[in-house]
Image (cartoon, rainbow, N blue to C red):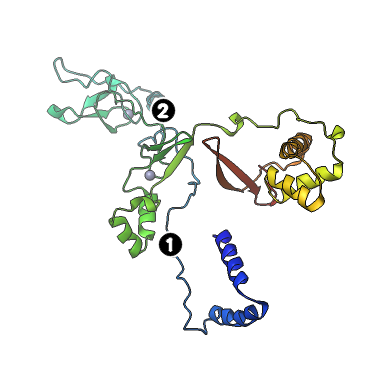
Amino acid sequence: MKNDLRKLLRWVCRKLTYNDLASVVPVLLEVLNGSRQDIELKPQEVRPPHYRQFRVDPQPPLCEPLLPHAPQKDWEELQADHLRATGKTIAKVARRTGSPMPPEKCRCRHCHAPVRYLYLNNGKLGSQVQCKICKRTSPTDKPRRESKARYWCPHCGYALFRWKEDGLCTAFKCPNDHCPVYVRNLAQLTPEEHAMRKAGNTSQFKLRYLFREYHFASQDLPLKRPEDAPVDLNRIHHSLHTLGLCLTFSISLGLSARLTAQALERVFGIRISHQTVVNYIKAAACQLADFTDENSPVPEGTCAADETYIKSGGQTRYTWLVITETRRAICG
Ligand SMILES: [Zn+2]
Ligand SMILES: [Zn+2]
């Protein structure tokens, strides 16, 4: 966008003489302060305020499901407490022969008391047991199917479902419609945004708790460093001044190797091949790599990163520039 504006500005300036421009500027100022009703500006694009932005949820997910109740004492501890207080232990359930029994593997879900301390609480239905140790009830249900979930929502405890997966990461989402995060985000949407959601544009708003599991750790990423220098900078055919010009044009001004070679020839009359320019850049990179490794700041505290990509050799390659909040220095 900035580039487009600059192009437009250059084009406009090419059409105007100095005097033309001098008379245009006051008109532009009038447009800017709103006193020219006859000249309309392009309307500003408005984005709904809750438009999906790439923001990481600050809380990591739980790696274990929440216990149904706050953790409490185990049946053996409760038994010991009882013995200390009364001098007696709680007896097993006395069962008449032939009376219905809870399933053998059933345990109290609160104190994990084994089946000998449990009796069926609701007669023939047999779906609930009462515990003699902690006096609380639990479902009789057969040993629960092991959940395949790996993460649980830190706000509501629901198991997160696998929402999206790509080569870089797997995204997990909280499906709970009563999750406090979802309820809060939903309530914050403006009426227009609600209308957009109804129209089927749900993915424009981030409403649910989301967690991305990256398939790599930062320490696994190999650090790419320049390979062997193609030339020895101490024994080049050109002067170090020419080397400096090569680096200025190619690195500081961002010209390609071919353009740098052309510029050196046209501006300074220095004949140099574009391959030599490439060799000088690579050799300078080799010289500087150790220095930058030793002296670039370490990321600390809050960092901001900008991602850009470039197609190279048919593959999309990504570059991130990372700056730290406190030092404002490029650290990665
Ligand atoms: Zn119990
Ligand atoms: Zn949730």
Q: Which marked residue is nearer to the observer: mark 1 or mark 2?
A: 1
Could you say which disc has been placed on residue 265 in the image?
none
Is the distance from the Cβ of mark 2 to the nearest ligand 1 atom less than 8 Å? no
Looking at the image, residue 120 lies above or below residue 202: above
Give the residue pinned by disc 1: 47
Left or right: residue 21 versus residue 153 is right
- Res 165 visible: yes
> Across the whole image, how many numbered discs are drawn on residues?
2
Quadrant in which the N terminus appears: bottom right
Quadrant position of ligand 1: top left
Left or right: residue 259 versus residue 29 is right
Alpha-carbon neighbours of circle 2 within 10 Å: few (<14), some, or many (≥20)?
some
CA–CA distance in space, label 1 to label 2: 63 Å
Quadrant in which the C terminus appears: top right
Residue 4's spot in the image, x, y percent?
55, 61
Q: Amino acid at mark 1?
A: Arg
Q: Quadrant of residue 111?
A: top left
**Residue drawn at (38%, 48%), measured in percent from left and top?**
208
**Residue drawn at (31%, 27%), measured in percent from left and top?**
108
Q: Secondary structure at mark 1?
A: loop
Could you say which disc has been placed on residue 81 in the image?
2
Q: Amino acid at mark 2?
A: Asp
**Residue drawn at (63%, 46%), measured in percent from left and top?**
322
Residue closest to the eye, 157 or 37: 37
Q: Secondary structure at mark 2?
A: helix
Residue closest to the eye, 120 or 155: 155
Q: Quadrant of residue 73?
A: top left
- Res 70 visible: no
